[in-house]
Amino acid sequence: MIFILQPYIFWDNENIYCLLFIIWKPCIVLKNLLKKNKALSNRQLSIVIQSNSVTVGLIDGDQSFIKQLPVQQGDFLGAITSLTQEIAINNSHCQIVLTHGNYQVVQVEQPNVPTSEVAQALAWSAKDLFTIKPEDQILDYYQNHSNNPSLNKLNVVAANRAVIGPIVEFLHQQKVNISGISIEDVVITQLLKPTSANVLIFHLPGSQVLIAVVEDGKLCFSRHIHGYDNLHQMSEADFGLGMLTNLGLEVQRSIDYALGQLRIDSIESIYVLIQNFDLEHLLTGMQEYFDLPVKSLKIEGDDDFIRFPINVAAVAELAMTENQS
């Protein structure tokens, strides 16, 4: 359960200004505050912020819109403003997702304080662990799923208020109801439907590979792997030059950690979600290293939307959040 870091939330009688992450599940207080806005509409807005681009998607009944724009000199708000000029976003429910490079994560021991005081304790103890200036930090935390009762670690997430604050304010001015702000590692759990434990190898063009272990919709483990920014452009020839060997080793390390340290009973399959035209050769090459099935993860939905899997996951996260409100 995620709790509010009180210094980063403020509201008045009519509006909520939320400058925090809602990671995993929204905190009880915030859920109660958001209930009064639930009747606005069923319009689902997803905003995915990557290091060099912004993707905005809107689903309104059987109508959908999705488009990506490059970001110039870190002007994320400018890209969002341009995209939202093409559609009416007012009275929509919104999920914002930050991808790798737009947030920082550190793992710490859970403070030995009452549960109600964990967030405040982390706000003080973790602030010096990030490269973001403490006065610019927006902090929250989540805990990975594990079957090992001796593990007592929390993942503390930080983002830059200078980036998030103007976006939240702009969306508020457009009468958008922000249901949550989350991160790539967490929302991709929405893409894996099986209840058993599985590995997901996930890659966005120009980004690092993300390896995650997910069980029954819960994130057990995630890590980003350097050196694969152009994986979407690689071919069978590249796969034969040791690239898949190194990636296979990273996947195996992740599996070993999940089984050994997290005490996950077993891993059923390895799913791959990579936008690569030579994907079949990649799957065949990866299968040589594992007894587990290596499969392509198929995403259901609008043909245009499925090209942007984080937006698909964001919509699913949004639906889950609204259902729990």
Image (tube, rainbow, N blue to C red):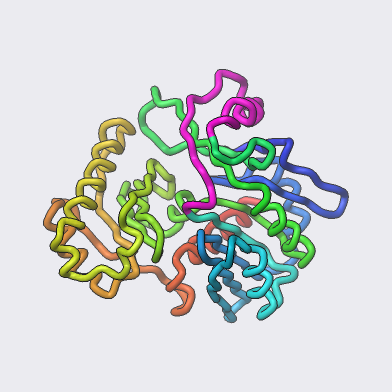
In the image, taking residue 181 as reference, residue 192 lies left or right, namely left
Residue 127 included in the magenta stretch of the image: yes
In the image, taking residue 5 as reference, residue 67 lies left or right, namely left
With respect to residue 250, does 315 lie above or below?
Answer: below
In the image, taking residue 268 as reference, residue 207 lies left or right, namely right
Total labels: the figure holds 0
Name the quadrant of the N terminus. top right
Residue ID at (55%, 76%): 67
| Of residues 229 and 140, the one drawn nearer to the viewer in this rendering | 229
Residue 291 included in the magenta stretch of the image: no
Answer whether residue 78 is visible to the viewer in this image. yes
**As drawn, which residue projects farthest toward the right?**
13
Answer whether residue 214 is visible to the viewer in this image. no
| Of residues 241 and 220, the one drawn nearer to the viewer in this rendering | 241
With respect to residue 85, does 125 lie above or below?
Answer: above
Residue ID at (73%, 46%): 32
Residue ID at (60%, 19%): 113
x, y percent for residue 27: 64, 41
> For the magenta stretch, what is the residue range?
100-129
x, y percent for residue 257: 28, 36
| Of residues 238 and 318, the one drawn nearer to the viewer in this rendering | 238
x, y percent for residue 218: 43, 45
Residue ID at (61%, 56%): 323
